[in-house]
Image: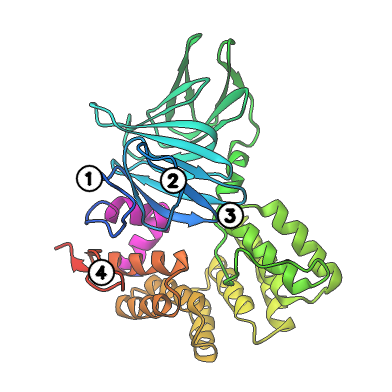
Amino acid sequence: MGRAANRWATCSGLLVCTVILTVFMSPSTSFAATCEPSIAKAMAVEGKVDVRHPDGTQWQSVKLHDTFCPGDVIRVQERSRADIALSNQPMLRLDQNTTMTLGGIKPTGGSLIELVKGATHFFSRVPRNLEVRTAFVNAGVEGTEGVIRVTDDKAEVTIFEGKVVAANESGTLSITDGQSVIAEKGKALSYQTVVKPRDAVQWALHYPPIQDTSPEAAVNENDPRSLAGRAARSLSVGRVDEANADIDRALKLDPKNSDALALQSIIAVVQNDKDKAMTLAQQAVAADPNSVSAKTALSYAQQASFDLAGARKTLEEEVKAHPDNALAWARLAELRASFSELEGSLEAAQKAVALNPNISRTQTVLGFAYLLQGRFQVPSATGEGWRSCA
């Protein structure tokens, strides 16, 4: 594969790569921030996310690419998630029922946040670039990746890679790869054994969307397609247990429901069960050969099995059969980029945004398509006006 494909493959995820290289390279298109420059930007908004400015009393809805100022309070509601990129590069993924205050940039250059409740999964390549304060413990991030969760009576800090120094009135503890610490009010910090540390961020896993569903759609508990729709919405915010429950019920009602089988295939892809993913995707296509969701799931299963050519062929055929499906075009843009087909990738990504600019997936893929060509975004409501970094 060419240089573009290598860049696609070596970034630590599409979103993180895009954030680090492009978020703060250009003026913002958002009207949320009242400071200059802003200190953070919303890179993904899934469900209901609000912000309250320090000089205000009302909560306002957060939209994709909104920017923030010191003192802003971000609130993520039930069955929702948000990705917040800080201006000095740390990336925060916020779980449902999370409230966080942005403290700004310290004189030493690191970002400061206060996690009031809920959980944040943090990622930073720059040492000493983030400090997280809670009611029970302060965590100075000296490494790369971990998660902090705050409840009414304690805070838990778990590190996947790197190092964090946790401190409260009882003293300090260093936390490194695979370690976890509990902090309770009035008690000394203590290590806890965690068999599978990354289970703490199952909610943060990204399940690629294969269908566009309304977040407010009513659910018929006896309709397999309706249940599959709710399962898709659950996956979009990382609630895999809830999604599995609806998928199981849908398949009991209709064992050959294509939507449910396609979603099972996507879960298997994310959980790295390639054979299961392929079997389920093929069953989904057999159940409904005209299903865009099934064909899209098949393309992910093919890619997981290292059949990129087959995945691209599947999507090329699918956009011909369903030229008005935005997610199919976005998926095709990803696959074309894998073959260094930069112009074709950009064309597909632009088509996806033109069909539905309100899906974050289409916007993210378009951003990466421009990034592969060495461009970054300048203010535009239409997706035009990108210019070269050279």
Residue 373 badge: 4
Q: Is 167 placed left or right of 190 in the picture?
A: left
Q: Is residue 17 magenta?
A: yes
Give the residue furthest to the right. 252
Q: Quadrant of the C terminus?
A: bottom left
Residue under numbered circle 2: 51
Task: Please report the bounds of the magenta region as a residue range.
Answer: 2-23
Which three-letter amino acid code belongs to the residue tagged 3?
Val
Instruction: Give residue 37's mark.
Output: 1
Which amino acid does the dot numbered 1 rest on?
Pro
Which label's residue is closer to the chain start, 3 or 1?
1
Image spot of residue 155 (x, y percent): 57, 25
For mark 2, give the secondary structure: strand
State which quadrant residue 142 falls in.
top left
Say whether residue 293 is visible. Answer: yes
Q: Is residue 310 left or right of residue 342?
A: right
| Mark 3 to mark 1 CA distance (whole Å) | 30 Å
Spatial separation of the CA atoms under disc 1 and disc 4: 26 Å
> Which picture quadrant has residue 139?
top left
Residue located at (49% from left, 25% from top): 134
